[in-house]
Amino acid sequence: MAKLREEYNNFLKDIEKNLKNKEDLEYVKVRFSMFVDKVIDEMDMLVNYKTQKMNELEQKQKEIDDKMSKMQQIIDNIEKDIYSDEGFDFEIICPYCDNQFVIDVDEDKTEVECPVCNNIIELDWSGDVEEDSNCNGSCSGCHGCDDEPEEQQEDEKQSMQSEDKKANKEENNDDDM
């Protein structure tokens, strides 16, 4: 603003020097003063508008910061619930003896020993579940039934069915006597 005042004063001095007619000089001074007043008023309005908008932006930013702080607190609480300092437990059912037990989650651990039957259970933390195409699902856990060829498994099923039929016939014959 100081530079603008200096320029204004220099302008008036230049006008006084170059205008010899006193009436013209007064007219120009008054008219120019009116113009400068209008410019100053417009500049004040712009500064006030800018200040008002800055205040509004600061208020909005404060509201956003408050909301972000509340969200962060909620997230922190959720993390505490999910990942407590003690860690969290993972429930396992032994495929060999159906014993149910709990271990701490440790993704570096790849196997665990069943506390009842002492068999080693492999751990897969990837979450992928693979279906065993050779397993017929008739047992309560995998006991190596997939080691037998499919044909042999089918033969054993048919053999057991035949034995059941034979036993039923003998039972029926005994009842008839």
Image (spheres, grey):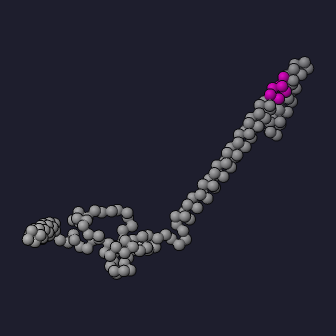
Q: Nearer the viewer, residue 25 or 57?
A: 57
Q: Is residue 36 visible?
A: no
Q: Is residue 27 depicted above or below 44 in this figure?
A: above
- Percent position (x, y) of residue 127? 37, 63
The answer to which image quadrant residue 134 occupies is bottom left
Q: Nearer the viewer, residue 30 or 117?
A: 117
Q: Nearer the viewer, residue 147 or 169?
A: 169
What quarter of the picture does the C terminus occupy?
A: bottom left
Provide the residue span drawn in magenta: 31-38
What quarter of the picture does the N terminus occupy?
A: top right
Indicate whether residue 36 is drawn in magenta: yes
- Percent position (x, y) of residue 139? 26, 69
Instruction: Write the residue at 38% across / 80% down.
Output: 115
- Percent position (x, y) of residue 2? 82, 40
**Magenta residues: mostly which secondary structure?**
helix
137 lies left or right of 10: left
Q: Is residue 77 depicted above or below 63 in this figure?
A: below
Q: Is residue 104 depicted above or below 6 in this figure?
A: below
84 lies left or right of 65: left
Instruction: Write the residue at 29% across / 70% down.
Output: 140
Indicate whether residue 39 is drawn in magenta: no
Q: Is residue 35 visible?
A: yes
Q: Is residue 49 depicted above or below 130 in this figure?
A: above
Q: Nearer the viewer, residue 156 or 177?
A: 177
